[in-house]
Amino acid sequence: MSLVEIENLHVSFRTDEGTANVINGVDLEVEPGEVVCILGESGSGKSVTLRALMQLLPKRRTTISGRIRVAEHDILSLDERKMADLRGPTVAMIFQEPMTAFDPVFTVGTQIVETIKRHEKISEREAEARALELFERVRIPSPKARLKNYPFEMSGGMRQRAMIALALSCRPSLLLADEPTTALDATVQIQILLLLRELQQELGMAIMFVTHDIGVAVEVGDRIAVMYAGRFVEMGSTREVFSRPAHPYTKGLMASTVHGDMKGQRMKAIDGSPPDLTRLLPGCAFEPRCGERIPVCRQVVPAIRTAGPGHTAACVHVGAPAKELA
Amino acid sequence: MTDTTATSTERPPVLLQVDDLKKHFPIFGGALNRQVGAVQAVDGVSFEVRRGETLGIVGESGCGKSTTAKLLMHLIEPDAGAISVGGEEVRRGRRGLREMRRRMQMVFQDSYASLNPRLTIEDTIAFGPKVHGVPVKVAKQRARDFLAKVGLDPNSFIRRYPHELSGGQRQRVNIARALALEPDIVILDEAVSALDKSVEAQVLNLLMDLKRDFDLTYLFISHDLNVVHYVSDRVLVMYLGKVVEVGPVEMLYTASQHPYTRALLSAMPAMDPDKRATEPPLAGDPPNPINPPPGCRFHTRCVHAEEVCKLKEPFLTRVAGEGHFSACHMAIEGSGHSQAPQRVAA
Ligand SMILES: Nc1ncnc2c1ncn2[C@@H]1O[C@H](COP(=O)(O)OP(=O)(O)O)[C@@H](O)[C@H]1O
Ligand SMILES: Nc1ncnc2c1ncn2[C@@H]1O[C@H](COP(=O)(O)OP(=O)(O)O)[C@@H](O)[C@H]1O
Ligand code: SF4
Ligand SMILES: [Mg+2]
Ligand SMILES: [Mg+2]
């Protein structure tokens, strides 16, 4: 059985401008020990997907339907107390801004110790020993002294390591990582990516890693799922998606990302901008910007089709030619 | 592409000349709130930019890129050093500044904070020309012209306010505003860094088009080495307030000489699932420019550091190619570093 099973997830928010349909039918399975990268531009619904898994969306303004199972728990039916029991030992989350994970008025050591004690019946001393071991594991220099630091006393990269230690303190089977390296220098980003990969292998945990950066996705993901307007438009092994992108949006995103030897060539930018989620049209959400659109694209949301081994894309041009073309 | 055979008489003239620029920010502390130290944000930076060229500036956060840009724009005053534009040193005082700002303009990363929320897009763009004595009607027409030039339909945008625009549109307005004074030089400080990739690509195309159409010279500051490679003719690498390497873009990317530049380059994601990184090129965060290490500022993180690196500060030295300089003891003849070229008896 998969560790994570998301079926036909829909999330909408009531806003002043109307109902924003943010997640529009997401299906995803994540196996134990697997790293899946969710790749997409801002506003595509990456963070909302992760937050739905942790029940972190504002209850009153949010409508959720579909099914989410994590380690055989039916997340959407859990009450707040049961969900709190899962946060830590089953699923934990790290963010772009570590200050959102820490309380600024307690030392990082205290916060890690308290988190461990909340979930496990162990003594203060054992919890402290675990905290120290975690700090060594995420390679914070002078770990003993650093546990006594307040979050603001640490540099950016070190705070990120401390947040990873906090998230791993109850040995979760699933780590949700929401752009944890986006605000860091590339020299620090690569350290954190390597650390996460190493910890993931040692602890055998699965990671759902959200990023807007193809380079980062290629660096950490076993699989990549490309998100656009609240749907996965393409999914497959990193090698497949990167070397044989099938969806016009994925191809456009790769052509828009400066890399290698593009010097002297004009960028093949995607025209226009993402759709207004309060006014989603029927059909493929990428249709207005797509260079390969045909009339049927506006009529129905394209089915998910096979693009290669373990590789799917939601585009009428992918795989066997669509019936509508004939 | 890099023409190393051209004699200096064929090269375009130097448009911007920066000599030994310094800016230290004092730090106050203690019970008496006395100065207890200084952030050596920019510490002896020199370079030149020729007409029509794009000079890229890279380096980790805090190395002094934005401070350099602000010094060039005289948004802050240097402690020491000189800046010349078009062969003339920028004069102190209001008139000197005004003339300089007409010739040199800047676009910042934060497209929202750099626009006045209470001004319409038309007034935003027309503001600069009006301050510089352009008649109101002409300034307004210029606003419309430049909106069109940056790919925004004047009829639908002139009456709008900044909050009604997307990030990409706001950055286009910022570019239009900078160009409305018809400057020679535009400083782009992380100008595309906050944009989504698909928008970044659109704005990069726009910047390249504008450069050609208006014969512009760019100073392109970014932490994204891929983008800097794409836009730059030459690249300057900064570390803790100092220039550590400068040279033609291809030389710098394929034959970098300074260990710091090499580390920066190998920290870039490989964009290839079969060539993933196994070792980080540098450990730890970039150090703080308060009380930087003596000798070579990079010696605390450098794998090639030797005794001389802790004692003596290396100076920019010509290396392999034309116009390529590195500030590393390994490049300095007879420096005492085991990998330095040996002094040859004449
Ligand atoms: N609590 C909320 N209320 C209303 N709209 C929201 C809320 N959270 C997110 N959204 C909207 O949902 C969309 C997707 O957001 P998000 O998942 O944060 O995108 P990203 O892919 O950048 O992480 C955006 O348009 C955002 O404005
Ligand atoms: N107004 C200021 N007062 C004190 N320190 C400053 C000020 N502006 C910048 N600094 C410091 O100077 C250093 C260089 O900053 P900056 O030029 O912004 O770097 P970069 O743009 O390369 O990231 C940093 O350590 C920064 O904290
Ligand atoms: S001077 Fe020494 S410490 Fe500095 S970069 Fe060169 S080898 Fe490294
Ligand atoms: Mg997000
Ligand atoms: Mg800066």
Image (spheres, coloured by chain):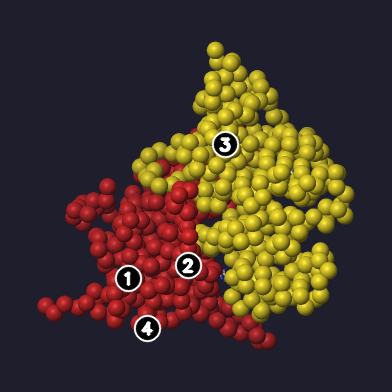
Residue A303 x, y percent position in the rendering: 64, 26
Q: Alpha-carbon distance for marks 1 and 3? A: 53 Å
Amino acid at the residue labelled 4: Glu
Chain seen in yellow: A
Q: Which residue is mark 3?
A: A310
Q: Which residue is mark 2?
A: B282
- Which corner quadrant holds the C terminus of chain A? top right
The answer for which chain carries disc 2 is: B
Q: Secondary structure at mark 1?
A: loop
Residue furthest left as drawn: B346
Q: Alpha-carbon distance for marks 3 and 2? A: 36 Å
Q: Quadrant of residue B95?
A: bottom left
Q: Which residue is mark 4?
A: B307
Mark 3 neighbour class, 10 Å CA radius: few under 14, some 14 to 19, many 20 or more: few
A99 up-or-down from A140: above or below: above
The answer for which chain carries disc 1 is: B
Residue B193 x, y percent position in the rendering: 53, 51
Residue found at x 68% / y 87%: B31
